[in-house]
Image: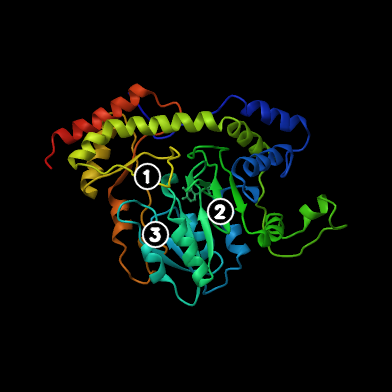
Amino acid sequence: MRIPFNKPYFTGKETQYIEDAVQSGKISGDGKYTMKCHRFFEDRYGFHKVLLTTSCTDALEMAAILIDIQPGDEVIVPSYTFVSTANAFVLRGAKIVFADSHPDHPGINEEEIEKCITPRTRAVVAMHYAGRACNMDKINSLAEKYGLYVIEDAAQAIDSYYNGKPLGSFGHLAAFSFHETKNIISGEGGMLVINDERLVERAEIIREKGTNRSAFFRGEVDKYGWVDIGSSFLPSDIIAAVLYAQLQNIDLIQSRRREIWNDYDKLLNPLAQQGFITTPYYPPGTTNNGHIYYLVCRSGKERDELMTHLKEQGILAVFHYLSLHRSLYYRDKHDGRTLPNADRFSDCLLRLPFYFQLKEKEIQYISRQINEFYKRRLL
Ligand SMILES: *Cc1c(COP(=O)(O)O)cnc(C)c1O
């Protein structure tokens, strides 16, 4: 058996909608399908304002421009995250103050944030790892106390909730990803959610190369020109056509992904009970959107051995996130604090194959192979 880590799932309507977009004669940004996607998100999740972008990375870069990050400003970012979470702010000259992960899960340890705040701190980035919400009550109350912006990196958090409210609706801004490896995909693609009304007008300008073109097309100004800095952050309507086909099937996709997650969890629970591995935990008030199934091994060495064992059985399991405070690019700029939890997840976390088409018998095979591996080990 050969089981890849990821396989994109297509609902069947993607090519039809691409064809339709092409036939309509307009495939640049903010066409018919982009508008349908915007409406979908605003209706389903009640987001104040959404704008499709070419990636989550771009949405984060827009966020950094929107909150006016200046050289020397500090931004608190978890170390255990994707590069873009920090890089977006570094592009504007920010100093990144890395926060450790929670001891029990890879997300930011809310208890560590306050210690990282200085008079130069401007923002906190909350990354919802595996769609599991950060403690937004705590983060938002700290932000209010110190006058900080909150940016959600919700790249992995589509269709997930915190205390009944959708992730992406807690920060001043939130960034989502539709990269091929996420639950809902358009190949490359992303979205900026603007929950703070004061940032909406400027968000449109930044997304349109620093021009007030969006207002012009709505007839609000009689000519458009260069009014601010910006870039080309809006995707072609072809991308939105693919995305819309996916969104129409979001409930189907999400329910299958949650099933896969639960199958893994049931089959691996005994190993966790015995203390060989740690499996993910979603506390009350958070939801599981079936984005990743991961396990945390007891050591980096054991993780690597398990990964090799699975590979020999045709199963591609992968780790990720070399903690950013130890990255080649940032380690000399980091303030030297050790972040043991982030390092432990870097060394010991392993993600199992996860995609819509994954069959029950494949999940059983993968779980059996993991059990086999631990049969020969001692506690
Ligand atoms: C996938 C991911 C990104 C980047 O998304 P792109 O759309 O590829 O730019 C950023 N942050 C996190 C946490 C991610 O998982």
| Furthest residue in direction left, as rendered | 378
Task: Pick the quarter of the image with the N terminus.
Answer: top left
Question: Gap between marks 1 and 2, in whole Å?
Answer: 21 Å
Left or right of residue 103, residue 7 in this image: right
Comes first in the chain, label 1 or label 2 = 2
Asked whether 268 or 87 is in front, the reply is: 268
Of labels 1 and 3, the one closer to you: 1
Which mark, by number, is residue 227?
none
> Callout 3: helix, strand or loop?
loop
Of labels 3 and 2, the one closer to you: 2
Q: Residues within 10 Å of mark 2 (few under 14, many from 20)?
A: many
The residue carrying mark 2 is 174
Q: In which quarter of the image is residue 209?
A: bottom right
The residue carrying mark 3 is 79
Q: Residues within 10 Å of mark 1 (few under 14, many from 20)?
A: few
Residue 212 can be seen, yes or no: yes
Name the residue located 66 percent from the left edge and 34 percent from the top edge.
241
| Furthest residue in direction right, as rendered | 222
Asked whether 188 or 107 is in front, the reply is: 107
Q: In which quarter of the image is residue 20?
A: top right
For residue 360, above or below residue 27: above
Residue 111 percent location from the top left of the image: 36, 63
- Colour theme: rainbow
Residue 156 can be seen, yes or no: no
For residue 220, above or below residue 145: above
Q: Do the residues labelled 1 and 2 touch (CB within 8 Å)?
A: no
Of labels 1 and 2, the one closer to you: 1
Q: Are marks 3 and 2 in contact (CB under 8 Å)?
A: no
The residue carrying mark 1 is 282
Q: In which quarter of the image is residue 288?
A: top left
Kind of residue sitting beneath label 1: Tyr
